[in-house]
Image (tube, rainbow, N blue to C red):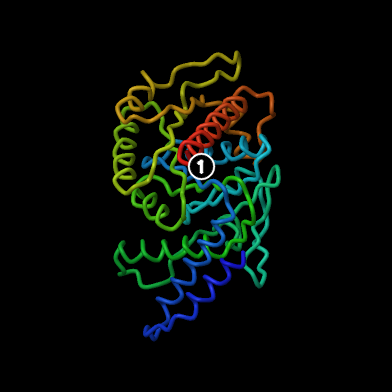
C-alpha cells in the first residue's frame, strides 16, 4: 500500500500547464482507478451489442451465483440512461460519501452495488442532459465516459473477488473497448445473446469489434434458450437453432443456456433472488463455477 501512496503522491505533484486543470483531474482519476481496481481480483464486463437480450438480468443473476458460491462480489451498472441493476437486486439507498470516496449500498449476500440510479431523486426520474442540445453525439459520448471514469475512481469497492460491469445495450458498441481502457487488468467480457438470427448477426459484429480493441471474450451465455411453460414446466423452443453455431464460428466457448422463465422475470421485477433449488438458479450456478474454474486455470497457465 505504501508504494501505491508514493506513486499517487509523485504523479499528483506533476506540474500542469492546463489552466482549467482538466488534464490533472483526469490523471488523478486514473490514478484512483488503478489503486481501487488493484484491490479487486477479477474484473469482468457483460456485453451484447444488441438490446433486449436480457443482459442486465444475466449480469444480476451471474453476480448472485458468484456471491452464493462464497465470493465477494461487486456490480457496476454503467447503463447511465436506463439503470436497472438496483431494482433487479432489490437494492435501495444512496452512496455514503466519505473523505476517501463513495461507499456503495449493499445487496443480497453482501454484494456491493454502484449505479446512476442512486443519484436520482425519485425512481422514475430520468437521467437528463442539461447542457446545450446542439452538442454532437461525440461530445455527449465523451461526457458519458467522464461519468463512468468518475464512477470507477470514486467508488470504494474495497477488497472483493469479482467486479461485474453491466455495459449499456444496443448501439453502445464502443463502450466495451473504452471500459477496457479504464479498468486495469480487465479479465475480459461475457457476451449475452439470444438464439435469434438477427441477434446473432449483431452480436457477431460486437465480438469482432471488442477483439479488435484488445478485449478478450471469456464466453457466451445463450439467454431465452426456450421458454418454460408455467403450467407444466416443459421447455418450449422460442427460436429455431441456438448459439452453438455462433460460438463455433467465433471460437467462443458457450458458458451455458438460460431459458425464459416467468418465475425468473417476476423475481427480477420484485428484486428477489430465485430460490437456491430453482432450476434456473442451478443453471447460473453451473455457469459461475465453469467461468471461475476457467479463469483460475487461465491464471495458472499465464504464471507458468
Q: Residues within 10 Å of mark 1 (few under 14, many from 20)?
A: many
Q: Secondary structure at mark 1?
A: helix
Side of 26 relative to 197 (left or right): right
Q: What's the residue at 61%, 25% (across, down)?
A: 282
Residue 47 spot, x, y in % from top left: 43, 42
Whether residue 40 appears in this view of the structure is: yes
Q: Which residue is mark 1?
A: 56
Q: Quadrant location of the N terminus? A: bottom right
Q: What's the residue at 38%, 22% (across, down)?
A: 242
Identity of the residue furthest to the front in this view? 304
Q: What's the residue at 66%, 47% (across, down)?
A: 111
Q: Foreground residue, 51 or 298? A: 298
Q: What's the residue at 49%, 26% (across, down)?
A: 256
Residue 149 spot, x, y in % from top left: 47, 62
Whether residue 81 appears in this view of the structure is: no
For the image shown, how many numbered marks are present on the structure? 1
Side of 37 relative to 49 (left or right): right
State whether residue 196 is above or below residue 152.
above
Residue 159 spot, x, y in % from top left: 64, 53
State whether residue 272 is above or below residue 93.
above
Q: Quadrant of residue 253?
A: top left
Amino acid at each position: 500500500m505504501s508504494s501505491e501512496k508514493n506513486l499517487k503522491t509523485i504523479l499528483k505533484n506533476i506540474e500542469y500547464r492546463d489552466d482549467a486543470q482538466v488534464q490533472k483531474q483526469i490523471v488523478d482519476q486514473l490514478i484512483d482507478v488503478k489503486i481501487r481496481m488493484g484491490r479487486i481480483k477479477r474484473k469482468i464486463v457483460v456485453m451484447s451489442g444488441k438490446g433486449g437480450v436480457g443482459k442486465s438480468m444475466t449480469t444480476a443473476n451471474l453476480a448472485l451465483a458468484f456471491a452464493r458460491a462464497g465470493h465477494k462480489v461487486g456490480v457496476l451498472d454503467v447503463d447511465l440512461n436506463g439503470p436497472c441493476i438496483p431494482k433487479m437486486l432489490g437494492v435501495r439507498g444512496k452512496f455514503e460519501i466519505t473523505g476517501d470516496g463513495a461507499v456503495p449500498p449493499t445487496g443480497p449476500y453482501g454484494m456491493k452495488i454502484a449505479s446512476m440510479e442512486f443519484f436520482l431523486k425519485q425512481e422514475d426520474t430520468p437521467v437528463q442532459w442539461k447542457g446545450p442540445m446542439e452538442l454532437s453525439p461525440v461530445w455527449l459520448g465523451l461526457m458519458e465516459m467522464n461519468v463512468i471514469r468518475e464512477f470507477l475512481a470514486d467508488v470504494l469497492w474495497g477488497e472483493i473477488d469479482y467486479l461485474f460491469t453491466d455495459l449499456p445495450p444496443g448501439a453502445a458498441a464502443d463502450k466495451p473497448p473504452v471500459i477496457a481502457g479504464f479498468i486495469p487488468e480487465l479479465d475480459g467480457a461475457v457476451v449475452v445473446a439470444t438464439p435469434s438470427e438477427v441477434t446473432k448477426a449483431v452480436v457477431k459484429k460486437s465480438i469482432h469489434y471488442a477483439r479488435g480493441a484488445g478485449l478478450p471474450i471469456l464466453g457466451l451465455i445463450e439467454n431465452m434458450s426456450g421458454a418454460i411453460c408455467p403450467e407444466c414446466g416443459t421447455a418450449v423452443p422460442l427460436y429455431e437453432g441456438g448459439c452453438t453455431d455462433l460460438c463455433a464460428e467465433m471460437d467462443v466457448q458457450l458458458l451455458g443456456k438460460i431459458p425464459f422463465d416467468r418465475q425468473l422475470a417476476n423475481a427480477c421485477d420484485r428484486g428477489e433472488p430465485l430460490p437456491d433449488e430453482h432450476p434456473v438458479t442451478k443453471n447460473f450456478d453451473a455457469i459461475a463455477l465453469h467461468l471461475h474454474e476457467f479463469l483460475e486455470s487461465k491464471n495458472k497457465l499465464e504464471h507458468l
